[in-house]
Amino acid sequence: MTDAVERREEVRAKIARATLDAGRGDSVTLVAVSKTFEADAIRPVLDAGQRVFGENRVQEAQGKWPALREAFPDLELHLIGPLQSNKAKEAVALFDVIETVDREKIAAELTKEVERQGKRPRLYVQVNTGLEDQKAGIDPRDTVAFVARCREIHGLPIEGLMAIPPFDENPGPHFALLEKLAREAGVEKLSMGMSGDYETAIQFGATSVRVGSAIFGSR
Ligand SMILES: *Cc1c(COP(=O)(O)O)cnc(C)c1O
C-alpha cells in the first residue's frame, strides 16, 4: 500500500523534472491508472492526495468508484478504454472525462446522454496514430474533420486528443503527430505517455500522462 504512495511520489518528481527540462511553464496532470486494482489498493493513493484516476472499463469502474467518490467528492475520473455505444449512458453518469471518443455513433450516443442527464463530461478524441488494426481510435488523417463534426453536428465540445503509440515503436513520432493534430484541430489537451514513456511524452507537449504500473505495480 505505502509502496504505491511512494511510487506515486517518484512519478510526480519525474513529471516535475521532465516539465522543467522541456522548458515548460505549465503543469502536467498525472492520471493514475487504477484498472484491475481494488478500492483497497486505491484508497491510500487518494489519502496521499491523488485526485485524478483513469479506468479502462465502464463496468469495472462502476463497481468501485461510486463509494470512493462519496469519500472523496473532488476526485476526477477519466475513461481511457474503448467505449461501446450501449455503455454511453453509464459512462456519462460516472466519468468526468471521456478520452476515447472515436466514431460518429459514439458521438451521437454521448450527445443524447449529455442532453438526457444534463451532465457534461469533458471529451477527448482517441487517435490511432499507428493505424493498428487491433487498436481503437480514429485514423490520424480523419481526426481534424472528426473533431469539427463532433463540434458542429453533435454539439460536443472536444477538449483534447489521446493516443496509445504502438507497443514496439519509438513513441516520439507518435507523440509529435498527436501534438500536430491537436494544433490543427484547435484542441488544448494532449493525453499521451504511460509508465514507460511519460517523460518523453512531456517533451512532446503532453498535458496529462496516464500512469498505471509505475504507481500501482504490475497487473
Ligand atoms: C493501462 C493503460 C495505461 C497505463 O499503462 P501503464 O503502462 O501501466 O502505465 C494508460 N493508458 C491506457 C489507455 C491504458 O489502457
Image (spheres, helix red, strand yellow):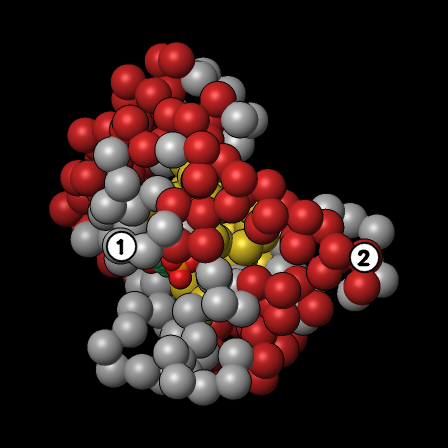
Residue toward you, 193 or 85 = 193
Q: What is the x, y in percent for residue 133?
A: 25, 82
Q: Residue at x 34, y 21 (%)?
A: 68
Would you say residue 177 is visible in this rendering?
Answer: no
Label 1 vs label 2, nearer the camera: 1
Other-residue count near label 2 (Cα within 10 Å), few / some / many at <14 / 14–19 / ≥20:
some
Other-residue count near label 1 (Cα within 10 Å), few / some / many at <14 / 14–19 / ≥20:
few
**Left/right of residue 206 with respect to residue 104 in the rendered view:** right
Count of residue discs: 2
Task: Residue under label 1, please give it.
Answer: 219
Task: Residue under label 2, please give it.
Answer: 20
**Left/right of residue 117 with respect to residue 124 in the rendered view:** left
Question: Disc 1 beta carbon < 8 A from ligand 1?
Answer: yes
Q: Residue at x 31, y 63 (%)?
A: 103
Q: Quadrant of residue 63?
A: top left
Q: What is the x, y in percent for residue 112?
A: 29, 39
Would you say residue 67 is visible in this rendering?
Answer: yes
**Left/right of residue 83 with respect to residue 16 in the rendered view:** left
Q: Is residue 103 above or below residue 35?
A: below
Residue toward you, 153 or 63 = 63
Disc on the earlier residue, 1 or 2? 2
Q: Is residue 124 above or below residue 74?
A: below
The residue type indicated by label 2 comes to Leu
**Left/right of residue 83 with respect to residue 212 in the rendered view:** left
**The C terminus: image quadrant:** bottom left
Q: Is residue 209 above or below residue 146?
A: above
Q: Residue at x 32, y 56 (%)?
A: 218
Q: What is the x, y in percent for residue 194?
A: 47, 61
